[in-house]
Image (tube, grey):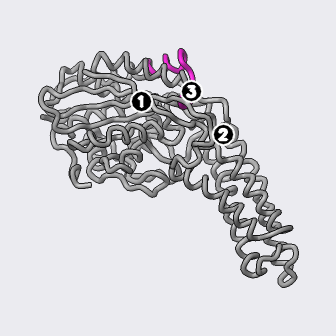
Amino acid sequence: MKTALEYGKDFGIDRQTEYAVKGITKICKRIGPRKPGSPEEYRAQQWFQKDMKNYCDKTEIEEFTIHRQGFMGFIPFTVACAIASVFVNWFASPVAALILCILAFIPLIFEFLMYKQFDDFIFPKQTSHNMIASRKPAGEVKKRIIMVGHSDSQFEWTLNYLIGGLQAKLFVEIPAVVGLIVQTVFALVCLIAGKGAAASDIESAKWFFILFFIVSCIFIPFEFAFLFFQSWTKAVPGASDNLSGCYVGMAAIKALDEAKIRFENTEVVMICSGSEEAGLRGAKAYAKAHEKELKEIPTAVVAIDTFRDLDTMAVYDRDLSGTLKHHNGIKVLIHDACANCGFDVKYESIYIGGSDAAAFTQRGIPATGFAAMDPAPPRYYHTRLDTPENLRPEAIEAGIEIMIEALCMFDKDGADGINNR
């Protein structure tokens, strides 16, 4: 039981990188965008399954039900409530305005920030899938390491494409949320200081309330612009996000097979999950369905997501908008694997959003996230620019090398505290 270096084998990293880039390119060209729960997502997983049959002992595709628009479908409702609250507060009732603000916040927090299946039932349902490939050990399975990358691609984030990810965040998304906060405070002030009267009827400190109303109105264009945050029909190619993650994991398994390395007691699993972009639905479905078996033996999960921007490659310590802390032992395992391969990476947090690792951590299954993506985010993120031509093979190569090292390290020593959740 050795680290990758100690095996003294040629894992053919250049060859594995070429395999990954070619695979990503073919899927983008022949299958195209893969919206959550779509036939295209399923076709990509069938492609992965056919490939992994060459290197794994068992492959299967499991189905589950999703409501793909549930994750972002709250946006028109939230925007309508936010804008309406300003005028209801001024002309009618701060109580009603406060209720509208609260209603606006609820799906924003539970769906977009916390990834709860809060309003899914309102939207049409679809069938999505997870592809699972397992490489068994030579002997008894005593521990398991799972790599998970998502097969689907996101609906285009229109504002990211038009003005850039950072600009969209600074000039639309943040002002829209700040506006909702201001409007909520305005309603509270009117409710308390104005004793429940409409803002226009409050005579004391009249100019203060007029000014507050004007400030609240200033944020309305930003909130209205939020309606165009995402396309509801057009999905993106998703070459880097996240075919690169899928192929990093699959190439690592392929490299082990071609080097004729079969661990003695460690099972290696690759999951190409479905509907991650619809709120981690595939990972959540898998973790729920397999929770018992995942806890029967020491199991580590690494969510591998988007390998393109080497300068910002990181191990993710916190997830779900910073509210969820991942397993320390798995986090250190990936960090040390990076160091062994010559990469000095930082521990980071996903401040807005989440990764598939969160679905496992929530159920007490040791996990962490690993990615090489500029968190700004870059303009290609969730846009039509995420194409095979925009790949950076050197980042994919680094991901493959690091994951091979991590697999071998886990086989040798496991991960600290893996049984002590």
**Residue drawn 61% across the image and 47% down it:** 166
Of 149 and 85, which appears nearest the observer?
A: 85
Q: Where residue 144 sits: x, y (%)?
A: 23, 37
Spatial separation of the CA atoms under disc 2 and disc 1: 25 Å
Q: Residues within 10 Å of mark 2 (few under 14, many from 20)?
A: many
Dot 1 crowding, Cα within 10 Å, few <14, some 14–19, many 20+: many
Residue 417 picture location, percent across and down:
22, 53
Q: Quadrant of residue 7?
A: top left
For mark 1, give the secondary structure.
strand
Direction from residue 343 to residue 409 in the image, left or right: left
Nearest to the eye among marks 2 and 3: give it.
2
Q: Which residues are magenta?
A: 23-37
Q: Are marks 2 and 1 in contact (CB under 8 Å)?
A: no
Rendered position, 194 above or below 355: below
Horizontal and vertical percent position of residue 272: 40, 30
Residue for badge 3: 237
Of marks 3 and 1, the one in the foreground? 1
Number of other residues with Cα within 10 Å of mark 3, as a class: few under 14, some 14 to 19, many 20 or more: many
Q: Closest to the observer: 375 or 85?
A: 85
Residue found at x 50% / y 33%: 65
